[in-house]
Amino acid sequence: RKEVEQDPGPFNVPEGATVAFNCTYSNSASQSFFWYRQDCRKEPKLLMSVYSSGNEDGRFTAQLNRASQYISLLIRDSKLSDSATYLCVVRARGGSYIPTFGRGTSLIVHP
Amino acid sequence: GAVVSQHPSRVICKSGTSVKIECRSLDFQATTMFWYRQFPKQSLMLMATSNEGSKATYEQGVEKDKFLINHASLTLSTLTVTSAHPEDSSFYICSAPQGLRVTDTQYFGPGTRLTVL
């Protein structure tokens, strides 16, 4: 079983739609959680950190469920520019806190 | 936010040559940097953890003699692909956490696209 799992998609949605991605992790020692966005042929860029109480940044809402070991990302009012791959990243205590990546979920927002 | 640079952004080389890729943290010090490789439509694969002042830690299956890593200072790590072959063609990305806490954000360099002919 992979340490961090995501549905690769693609999620194909119209502009204005609400879309949600989930990510599950297997390491119960995981301490910090992030969502990154990666555009085609570019490096990943931090979208938002995920806090225990859940957090929101504009149209984006992230949630963490430690008991079930998953995190989620909700995008409201999708824009064409939201089309990208969304990567779930988990870091656990110990060593160099090596971040573990999911394989990413592809989102395509169409007119 | 913190910035990580990589150089070169793109390189095309002949089979058998060596290629050096530099990763720099521009406004913070990084005792640890990570090197990843990404093939088309694949996820990021961690190759190694670069540690300032000590040897790099390689992931299983990554040849340390082929992918030489040197973390010369708190702001610079280099990856040298020795005797490159076409199968080494990939997108190489470095990253550095901004601090030593597990919650610190990790910043990525813009990547180096390597094509070996």
Image (spheres, rainbow, N blue to C red):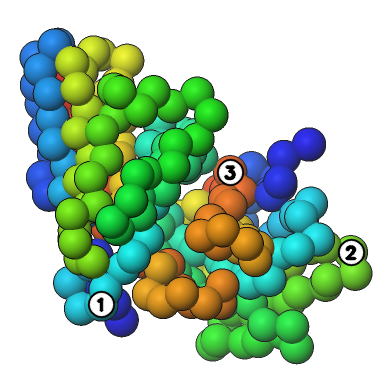
The image position of residue B69, as x and y in percent, is 27, 40
Res B48 → quadrant: top left
| Of A26 and B49, the residue lying toward us | B49
The mark lying in front, picked from 3 and 1, is 1
At x 58% / y 52%, what residue is drawn? A100
Per the image, the residue denoted by label 3 is A103
The CA distance from mark 3 to mark 1 is: 28 Å
What chain is tagged by disc 1? B
Q: Residue furthest right?
A: A67
Q: Residues within 10 Å of mark 1 (few under 14, many from 20)?
A: some
Q: Which mark is residue B28?
A: 1
Q: Which mark is residue B75?
A: none
| Of A52 and B59, the residue lying toward us | B59
**CB of mark 1 within 8 Å of CB of mark 2?**
no
Res A95 → quadrant: bottom right
Does residue A3 appear in this view? yes
What chain is tagged by disc 2? A
Per the image, the residue denoted by label 2 is A68
What chain is tagged by disc 3? A
The amino acid beneath tag 3 is Arg
Numbered disc 3: secondary structure: loop
State the count of labels: 3
The CA distance from mark 3 to mark 2 is: 20 Å
The amino acid beneath tag 2 is Ser
Q: Is residue A93 above or below residue A60?
A: above
The image position of residue A102, as x and y in percent, is 61, 49
The amino acid beneath tag 1 is Phe
In the figure, is residue A79 to the left or right of B51? right
